[in-house]
Image (cartoon, grey):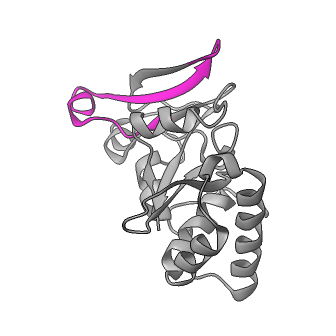
């Protein structure tokens, strides 16, 4: 699937039938190649849930188009809910060079980035990963070994002007902090989507 850089205004446009079919083929192939991420879940279960909610398919298309490589990482057997997470090895390149949120973007007087992580995630219909979700993802493989990803920041940290991000270095997963207005070419963000 073609990777594109998106802006919050266009990521949830309705999918054409060709885009929908291509996305489902891409997701099914990734699902089959990475069965350890979702042991005990059948693709038929996933597809059935996706086909009942075109909005979730549009969100997954946005995640895919920005380089996220979403895949199933959790399944709730009681509710049937399935969770997709961005599983690209490095933080999605279509989401680099963003500060954390709108408050940080507005506060920056010079050299503003092109946008902010929280708004782009919301426009995609997805949520930034929490610290806990990030650690769970890192149990499934080695992610962000050359990049880093903004994470959903606790309010008490954000109230003091900070935001958190994670990466993997030296065989360990680290959670760090920065000023929320900072942005870097090698830092994007990862999202989760419940279907």
129 or 76: which is nearer to us? 76
Is residue 161 magenta-colored? Answer: yes
In the rendered view, tell whether residue 25 sits above or below residue 176. Answer: below
Q: Position of residue 100 (x, y in %)?
A: 42, 39
Q: Quadrant of residue 108?
A: top left
In the rendered view, tell whether residue 98 sits above or below residue 172. Answer: below
Residue drawn at (72%, 78%), measured in percent from left and top? Answer: 19
62 or 194: which is nearer to us? 194
Instruction: Please state, as top left, top right, bottom left or bottom right, where the N terminus lies in the image.
Output: bottom right
Residue furthest to the bottom in view is: 17
Q: Is residue 16 visible in this depiction of the protein?
A: yes
Determine whether, in the image, residue 163 is placed left or right of residue 111: left
Residue drawn at (57%, 80%), measured in percent from left and top? Answer: 48
Q: Is residue 120 visible in this depiction of the protein?
A: no
Is residue 183 magenta-colored? Answer: no
Residue furthest to the front in view is: 40
Q: Position of residue 103 (x, y in %)?
A: 31, 43
Q: How many marks?
A: 0
Q: Quadrant of residue 149?
A: top right
Q: Which residues are magenta?
A: 150-172
Residue drawn at (52%, 76%), measured in percent from left and top? Answer: 49
In the rendered view, tell whether residue 178 sits above or below residue 7. Answer: above
In the rendered view, tell whether residue 68 sits above or below residue 15. Answer: above
Q: Position of residue 79 (x, y in %)?
A: 37, 68
Q: Position of residue 137 (x, y in %)?
A: 55, 39
Residue drawn at (70%, 73%), measured in percent from left and top? Answer: 24
């Amino acid at each position: 699937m073609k990777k594109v850089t998106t802006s919050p205004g266009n990521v949830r446009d309705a999918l054409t039938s060709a885009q929908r079919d291509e996305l489902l083929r891409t997701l099914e192939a990734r699902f089959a190649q990475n069965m350890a991420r979702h042991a005990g879940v059948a693709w038929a279960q996933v597809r059935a849930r996706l086909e009942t909610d075109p909005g979730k398919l549009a969100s997954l298309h946005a995640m895919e188009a920005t380089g996220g490589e979403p895949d199933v990482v959790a399944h709730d057997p009681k509710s049937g809910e399935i969770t997709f997470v961005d599983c690209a090895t490095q933080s999605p390149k279509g989401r680099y060079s963003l500060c954390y949120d709108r408050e940080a973007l507005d506060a920056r007087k010079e050299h503003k980035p092109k946008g902010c992580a929280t708004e782009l995630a919301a426009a995609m219909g997805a949520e930034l990963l929490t610290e806990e979700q990030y650690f769970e993802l890192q149990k499934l493989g080695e992610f962000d070994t050359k990049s880093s990803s903004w994470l959903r920041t606790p309010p008490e940290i954000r109230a003091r002007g900070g935001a958190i991000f994670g990466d993997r270095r030296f065989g360990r997963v680290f959670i760090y902090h920065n000023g929320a207005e900072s942005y870097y070419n090698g830092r994007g963000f990862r999202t989760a989507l419940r279907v």
